[in-house]
Image (cartoon, helix red, strand yellow):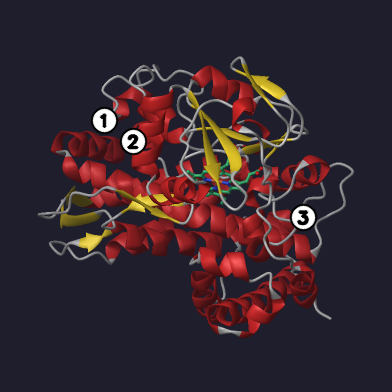
Amino acid sequence: MTVTDERFEKMKPFNGGMAAKIPSRALPPGPRWPSLLQSIALVRFRHQFVPAMHRRHGDVFTVRIMPKGSALVLFTRPEQAKEIFAGDPEVFHAGKGNAILGPIMGEHSLLLQDSTEHKRARKLLMPAFNGAALRGYQSVVTKLAKEEVARWQPGRPFRSLDRMNALTLEVILRVVFGVTDESRLAELRPLVNKTVDINPAVLLGWGYPFLQRFGPWKATVDNQRALDRVMYAEIAERRAAGDLHERTDVLSQLLTVGADGEAPMSDAELRDQLVTLLLAGHETTATALSWALYELGRDRAQLARAQRAADAGDDGYLEAVLKESMRLHPVIPMVVRHLMKPVTIGGVDLPAGTNIGPSILIAHSREDNYPSAEQFRPERFLEGHVAPNTWIPFGGGVRRCIGAGFSLMEGVAVLREVLVRYDVALPAGALDSPKVRNITSVPKRGARIVVQAR
Ligand code: HEM
């Protein structure tokens, strides 16, 4: 039996992960609608629903979500976010909230682990995301970005989200997986594209073995098996490669680290972490970049300022452009923790079993955190006025996004290549707004832009 067969054997139907029914009187106020309606509102219409609940119920409120009407208490103030991020990881679990992704990411995934397993995985992965490692990735990212923007056709409007998705996927394949062989890249691209195109209905259903023989479930399982085959082949070849220490990609580094006293990663662990990095790092970064291009395309003065920075090699300003785009258009709306014991946050007593989290959407749009919050003003991040725990697109604490530095490095490199080459504008009728795609919020019309050679 292969490792993949074992993985499929072990799968169980999704049971709501961390669901627990807590009586309403024990929790902060919230809507009294049926939990199905609240779930739909939270998942599909979060950009209207969450601000409306904040206006109506105040800084802390409870929503009830499917499948068991479990409670999710959302916090909106920076001091509350601080308490949550600093919470004891043995009490504030994060992995359970992501259980639905288990079939794709695998049981070892950093996103799904808690406690000792999470600590071990994080320790082994961290060196590949530190400052020195990030500097090592820069030249390949810049080369891929240059090749991508050289193909753009001046004067012809296009969906920047699609181009950014193609680019960030290429970055993952080459910089994270470290694949250089053209035929292997050609083999991987369609498999990886299908893997990232997650369908929640498939995720919910595919723990039932009989479903795996039909329609979209069969297609997903077949694709997973094919992807695993290629990934394990790549891992085996890389283990045997004599030049691992000279390679700068993430996989090669993960193969060389055995953090103090920790056993090195098994093939199954490596596979799970690579798929996790792919799913967590690809569309998120592409979305942030497409919003940045969209905002620059809307505002000639901001575009000129960013172009001057790109020409002068002022990466600090380009980073501020990205940070402000992520503030104004959070890619992920909230961070969730599952309480293993009763705790008090911001003076609110919460029983064990409650799901809680800071709302990124509200933190980024509060006027007391960001005056004229509706405006795109990258200067905010230069003036040094951004208070702690008000800018939280990457979450925080021991679970803070491990790829935060990676995505900023990648984003700056891509913006630089676009801006030194092109003027960016919005085509007529291209005003955009966020729409929910699975967990992330993406520009509804794909953040359409039009470029002209400078
Ligand atoms: C704009 C881009 C990105 C955004 C907005 C983003 C956002 C997030 C957020 C909100 C979390 C949860 C943090 C928490 O629970 O406190 C997270 C976790 C994570 N992200 Fe990202 N992310 C981005 C890019 C990336 C990239 C490029 C990678 C990898 C190459 C990555 C890998 C991960 C992983 C592995 C975790 C789980 C960390 C853990 O549980 O210890 N992300 N990300």
Instruction: Give the residue number, with chain letter if any, for mark 2.
Output: 328
| Marks 3/2: CA–CA distance | 39 Å
Q: Nearer the viewer, residue 238 or 59?
A: 59
Closer mark to the observer between disc 3 and disc 2: 2
Q: Residue at x 41, y 35 (%)?
A: 361
| Marks 3/1: CA–CA distance | 46 Å
Q: Position of residue 356 (x, y in %)?
A: 60, 33
Instruction: Give the residue number, with chain letter if any, for mark 3.
Output: 256
Q: Look at the image and tell me whether residue 52 can be seen.
A: yes
In terms of sequence position, does the residue under pointer 2 or pointer 1 come before the other? 2
Closer mark to the observer between disc 3 and disc 1: 1
Query: In the picture, which quadrant includes the N terminus?
Result: bottom right
Q: Residue at x 22, y 62 (%)?
A: 158
Whereabouts is ligand 1, in terms of quadrant? top right
319 on left or right of 233: left
Mark 3 CB near ligand 1 (8 Å cut): no
344 on left or right of 34: right
- In the displayed structure, would residue 326 be above or below residue 8? above
The picture quadrant where one finds residue 306 is: top left
Q: Secondary structure at mark 3?
A: helix
Q: Secondary structure at mark 1?
A: loop
Q: Position of residue 246 (x, y in %)?
A: 67, 57
